[in-house]
Image: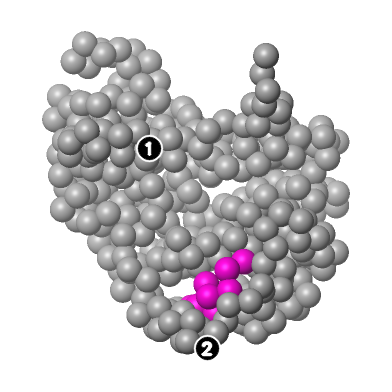
Amino acid sequence: MDLLSARINSLPVSATLAMAAKARELKNSGIDVIGLSLGEPDFNTPEFIKDAAIQAVEDNWNSYSPVDGYADLKEAICNKFKRDNNVIYQPSQIVVSTGAKQSIANVCMVLLNPGDEVLLPAPYWVSYSAIATLAEAKSTVIPSSIETDFKITPEQLEAAITPKTKLVIFNSPNNPSGTIYTEEEYRALGNVLKKYPDIFILSDEIYEHINYGTPHFSIAAIPELYDRTITVNGVAKAFAMTGWRIGYIGAPEWLAKACNKMQGQITSGANCIAQRATIAALDAPVSNIQYMIDEFAKRREIIIGLLKAIPGIQINQPQGAFYVFPDVSYYFGKTLKGKKIENASDFALYLLEEAHVATVTGDAFGNGDCIRISYAASEENIRNAIDRIAKALQ
């Protein structure tokens, strides 16, 4: 008899974390595994942010923080939205959470009812569909492919809408594909959504600063959509602060209040020291982190060049984030070193076992033709990893 709830049994295990765990197991058994599965910058947190955290410890910031975040942090977030995104939010519209993942979960929990539909332009981040499932909603995937640069069209969006559609989740720059929707493309998708006033938009902009020349555009900057757009962001990726666990939303006030209520019963306020450090991160000019973006840009060129040289691997030129999402379907149905490759999951497992390189299957992101490779790794590791992959596929 199953003692666990149907809720937890309906939830898939995070594919990225599962792959990282498998890679760790092999590493612990003495095998030299190169991990390119996690979306985690390999930089240290910048010194000026660490200094702010140390100062906060010295200044005895050690009490419970307000559930929705410190007032001066919320002020800093409002200033950031105005400076970087041309979007005006008041502090009452901001909720600070323990990572952007919690921000997304809060929104889905307070907005979705059983049977509501969530539209997920694919490829999408693995946790969107899992969180929707937890909220007892149904995910509808809108497919795309490497041929369209992993972007959906306004026609596809319109065709996917039903009377039950409650939420659409956009993510640009995108995890796993690195795709960026231009302002023009977002406005065209926005024109479709203007016709459906009951549909909300969650815009996950966690990778906004990691882009290579395509200006970032926020959907909330479209006046007619502002009142039903929830902008999600955080400091993990651009500031190399993954373990600090700070995410936040800008949202209609009534929705921010509901997220505050939700969070008040689950975690309460986010870590006090991490919040103080985040003020320093957001107040600083974006140029302070340009050195990381320049380094990612260099690695992107390297990894694309190396992957292009492998027969059967199709790759496009992503404009942001630190992932490539090559199409590996050429290998499906083939047998490599006695192992039959039926799909992307088999392919990723083969690379782990044969080449000792950890990647993530595209199945987890709603595209079964691809695998995700993170280039948030040293140049040496990238070169070695792709060399191993090339040899394993010969």
Towards the viewer: 34 or 162: 34
What predominant SS class does the magenta segment belong to?
Answer: helix
Which residue position is annotated with label 2? 59
Whole-percent x, y for residue 205 in the image: 56, 60
Q: Amino acid at mark 2?
A: Asp
Q: Secondary structure at mark 2?
A: loop
Q: Which mark is residue 367?
A: none
Percent coordinates x, y for residue 359 in the rendering: 34, 38
- What percent of the width, then of the height, locates residue 285? 46, 83
Q: Mark 1 = which residue?
A: 21
Does 275 appear in magenta?
Answer: yes
Report if residue 347 is visible in the image: yes
Quarter of the image containing the C terminus? top left
| 40 or 23: nearer the viewer | 23
**Does 99 lie within the magenta span?**
no
Q: Which numbered disc flags the more N-terminal residue, 2 or 1?
A: 1
Residue at point 26% right, 29% down? 351
Tell me which segment is drawn in magenta: 270-282
The residue under the point 36% across, 76% down is 46
